[in-house]
Amino acid sequence: MSLLTVRDAATGALELKTDDPAQIAAVLAEVGVRFERWPLADLPADASAEEVLAAYRPRLDALMGETGAGSADVVKLDPSHPQKDALRAKFLAEHTHTEDEVRYFHAGCGNFVLHIRGKIYDAHCTAGDLISVPANTTHWFDPGPEPRFTALRIFTDTAGWVPHYTGSDIAERFPVITA
C-alpha cells in the first residue's frame, strides 16, 4: 500500500499521514512531484528486464514523449545482492540530480524521502506507483535492509542521474525502513 507521511524538517512533528493515492498525488503535486498509480503488467516474478520493459512500452512511450526522456531501463534489487548494504548507504545520503528521477515500481517497494521547503515528504512507493522527483530536489531513497524491488527508470540522459551529495545529515534524523 502506498503511503505518504509529511513531517516538519526541524522538529520531526508529523503533519500528515495518508494512504489515499489521490491525496498522495495532490500533496506531492504541490511541491512539483508527480505521483501516479499505473495498472500492473501480468508478468512472472522472474521476468527479464526486457520483458518488463516490453510490458510497459505503451505507457513508457507516452511518458517519455511527454517528458522528453530518451531511455528507460529496469533495475532489480533483492536481499541476495552482494552490495545491497553499500548501495543502501549510498541511497540514504541526501542528494540531488541534474535531471528528474523517474521510477515506476513493477514489484516491491521503497521510500523516496524528499526534503522540500522545510518539510520531509516520505513517499512509500509500492508496486504500481510512478514517482517523478524534479531535478535539483534534495532527497534520499530507502530500499530497506532487505531490499526487494523491480523498478523502471526513465532518463533523459543517464549522466544526469549522478548523485550530488549535499553533505547534510538530515537523512539520519528521520526514520528508515527497519524490516
Image (cartoon, rainbow, N blue to C red):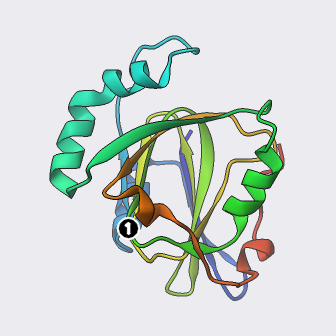
For residue 62, side relative to residue 159 (left or right):
left
For residue 71, side relative to residue 136 (left or right):
left
Question: Regarding mark 1 in the picture, which secondary structure is present there?
Answer: loop
Residue toward you, 162 or 92: 162
Residue 24 found in image quarter: bottom left
- Placement of the N terminus among the 4 image quadrants: top right
Picture coordinates of residue 156 (x, y %)? 30, 57
Circle 1 Cα neighbour tier, 10 Å, few/some/many (<14 / 14–19 / ≥20) = many
Going by the picture, which residue comes out furthest to the front?
A: 159
- Placement of the C terminus among the 4 image quadrants: top right
The residue lying at 33 percent from left, 21 percent from top is 55
Badge 1 amino acid: Glu
Residue 128 found in image quarter: top left
Picture coordinates of residue 103 (x, y %)? 44, 48
Residue toward you, 145 or 16: 145
Above or below: residue 156 compared with residue 20: below
Mark count: 1
Above or below: residue 33 compared with residue 73: below
Above or below: residue 167 compared with residue 89: below
For residue 102, side relative to residue 18 (left or right):
left
Q: Which residue is mark 1?
A: 99
The residue lying at 42 percent from left, 38 percent from top is 73
Picture coordinates of residue 137 (x, y %)? 47, 75
The residue lying at 27 percent from left, 29 percent from top is 57
For residue 172, side relative to residue 47 (left or right):
right
